[in-house]
Amino acid sequence: QVQLVESGGGSVQAGGSLRLSCVGSGFNSSTYYMAWFRQAPGEQRKMERKGVAVISPDGITTYGDSVQGRFTISKDSASNTLHLQMNNLKPEDTAVYYCAAEPLPRVKYGGSWFYWYEYNYWGQGTQVTVSS
């Protein structure tokens, strides 16, 4: 049974930093795509979650335009832990951040892995609030 548990959220002032963590169990992260999504205040539907950063099973990273150069996604395969280092935070980064995971498809798949419907496994979310 795949489980994902996020931690590390909190409140910071603009320009500050936070490091999110997501501990996974029940799967081997070296064979899964893993990602961070976020859902802005007032948005409640899963389809409103927006991709922030993705890491492939072999460690290739991709970022959304709004966080490129400020956020860094990484994973520790030995402990099945996903991280998101967030620097120079802005008020518009305020959101609930979710960890997501999906096994590498058995057939060739050309998706971006930046969409909510590409993932079946989700954590419960952690709140990040950035004040100006």
Image: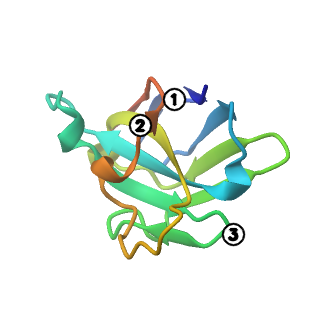
Residue, x 26% and y 43% (percent of image)? 49
Quadrant of the drawing holding the C terminus: top left
Spot the residue most to the front.
107
Q: Which residue is mark 2?
A: 97
Residue, x 58% and y 60% (percent of image)? 72
Residue, x 65% and y 45% (percent of image)? 82
Q: Secondary structure at mark 2?
A: strand
Going by the image, does 65 lie left or right of 72?
A: left
Tell which of 28 and 114 is nearer to you.
Answer: 28
Q: Nearer the N terminus, badge 2 or badge 3?
A: 3
Q: Closer to the camera: disc 3 or disc 1?
A: 3
> In whole angstroms, how far apart are the C-alphas of marks 1 and 2?
8 Å
Q: Are marks 1 and 2 in contact (CB under 8 Å)?
A: yes
Tell which of 114 and 26 is nearer to you.
Answer: 26
Q: Secondary structure at mark 1?
A: loop
Q: Which mark is residue 58?
A: 3
The answer to whether residue 113 is above or below residue 40 is below
Tell which of 37 and 87 is nearer to you.
Answer: 37
Residue type at mark 3?
Answer: Asp
Q: Position of residue 14 (x, y in %)?
A: 40, 45
> In whole angstroms, how far apart are the C-alphas of marks 2 and 3?
23 Å
Q: Is residue 98 visible?
A: yes
Q: Residues within 10 Å of mark 1 (few under 14, many from 20)?
A: some
Q: Is residue 7 visible?
A: no
Q: Position of residue 101 (x, y in %)?
A: 52, 45
Spot the residue most to the left.
42
The answer to whether residue 82 is above or below residue 131 is below
Q: Residues within 10 Å of mark 2 (few under 14, many from 20)?
A: many
Q: Which residue is mark 1?
A: 9
Q: Which corner quadrant of the image does residue 80 belong to?
A: top right
Q: Secondary structure at mark 3?
A: loop
